[in-house]
Image (cartoon, helix red, strand yellow):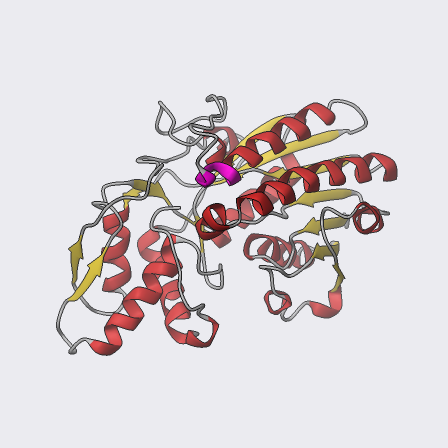
């Protein structure tokens, strides 16, 4: 049955992928984004099937208009990217907290009964248990470190959603994405940064020679990277089957070191990597890998391995140099 969805942040990397799937499945979709980091090009091919509203998620009038008539709101607006955590922490917190409150209030006023909220694995930082289930304590290790502006604001967003959501809603569900990667995801994350770095080194290094590849830290940090297509299928499962006032991890249990990611990226160019280690960023999480048994119980599991999914993403970054910013940051977000 066709439903009416609002996706906030719907021209962003994750949001646009969801919009495409919702449209393919025959739903009516409205998108709200200010395109600060999002871009309408991500909606190419479905522009005439999506209603796009340009506006600030913190503006009550804009959000009230956006939620009007919707069956379900999927709230994905946020300022993501490690660079922004350090350089614009006030904006990161403001968009997350004010945006969450504005969406909750607008949904209540418009009597929207279902709200799905994006959180992050950053909400729990460095867990004592890996793979990590949804019920671990949420932690801000140091409130003075701007690195935690994002994780802390996501923690607060979960509190807002799940407590305000106790009344006035049929269903409020929170999901935590875990290191999603894919083409056109921006440049403030490990996979695009490594892809750009390898592409630039490939151009200036003699063919057949190994590529020297510097890392922040020793590369022993681990993450579990999920391809955006797997993630989007998982999110669709949470949207349709997730239980009221519950939290779901969306990720994979394929835990790999950052060093291995670098080696796989360089291998996509037919090269061997010579890893150079350096100082690690302050506040780095050493290990992150989700327990996904809760979402698997809803009938979903990831299917794309990192080795299978990574090469086409690396090629996308190689083939789009015109989109590269002057600099990119971060090794293991």
Question: Image quadrant of residue 271?
Answer: bottom left
The magenta segment: 146-150
The answer to whether residue 24 is above or below residue 123 is below
Q: Percent from the top left, x then y, of residue 287?
A: 32, 35
Instruction: State whether residue 189 appears in this view.
Output: yes
Whole-percent x, y for residue 111 in the image: 86, 36
Q: Which residue shows up at 61% across the image and 26% down it? A: 246
Seen at 38% across and 65% down, the residue is: 312
* Residue at (17% x, 55% y) in the render: 276
Foreground residue among 174 and 105: 105
Closer to us: 146 or 33: 146
Residue 223 x %, y %: 34, 42
Q: Is residue 238 above or below residue 12?
A: above
Direction left: furthest residue:
209
Question: Can I make out residue 26 in this image?
Answer: no
* The image quarter in which residue 45 lies: bottom right
Image position of 74 (left or right of 91): right
Identity of the residue drawn at 59% across and 57% down? 12
SS assignment for the magenta stretch, majority: helix
Q: Is residue 62 magenta?
A: no
Q: Would residue 11 be found to the left or right of residue 80 on screen?
A: right
Q: Is residue 281 left or right of residue 73?
A: left
């Amino acid at each position: 049955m066709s439903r009416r969805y609002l996706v906030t942040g719907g021209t962003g990397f994750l949001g646009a992928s969801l919009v495409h799937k919702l449209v393919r499945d025959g739903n009516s979709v409205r998108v709200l984004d200010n395109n600060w980091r999002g871009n309408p090009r991500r909606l190419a091919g479905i522009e005439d099937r999506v209603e796009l509203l340009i506006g600030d998620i913190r503006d009550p009038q804009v959000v009230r208009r956006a939620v009007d008539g919707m069956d379900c709101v999927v709230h994905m607006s946020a300022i993501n990217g490690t660079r922004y955590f350090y350089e614009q922490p006030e904006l990161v917190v403001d968009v997350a907290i004010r945006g969450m409150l504005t969406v909750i209030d607008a949904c209540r006023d418009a009597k929207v009964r279902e709200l799905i909220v994006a959180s992050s694995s950053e909400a729990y930082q460095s867990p004592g248990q890996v793979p990590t289930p949804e019920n671990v304590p949420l932690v801000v290790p140091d409130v003075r470190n701007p690195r935690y502006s994002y994780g802390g604001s996501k923690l607060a967003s979960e509190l807002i959603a799940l407590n305000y959501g106790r009344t006035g809603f049929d269903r409020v569900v929170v999901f935590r994405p875990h290191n999603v990667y894919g083409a056109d995801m921006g440049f403030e994350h490990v996979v695009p940064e490594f892809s750009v770095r390898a592409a630039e080194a490939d151009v200036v290094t003699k063919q057949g020679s190994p590529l020297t590849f510097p890392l922040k830290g020793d590369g022993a940090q681990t993450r579990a990277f999920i391809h955006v297509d797997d993630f989007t299928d998982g999110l669709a499962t949470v949207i349709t089957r997730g239980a009221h006032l519950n939290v779901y991890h969306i990720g994979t249990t394929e835990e790999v070191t950052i060093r291995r990611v670098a080696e796989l990226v360089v291998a996509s160019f037919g090269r061997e990597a010579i890893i150079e280690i350096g100082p690690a960023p302050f506040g780095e999480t050493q290990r992150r890998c989700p327990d996904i048994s809760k979402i698997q119980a809803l009938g979903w599991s990831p299917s794309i391995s990192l080795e299978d999914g990574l090469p086409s993403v690396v090629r996308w970054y190689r083939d789009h140099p015109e989109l590269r910013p002057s600099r990119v940051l971060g090794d293991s977000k």
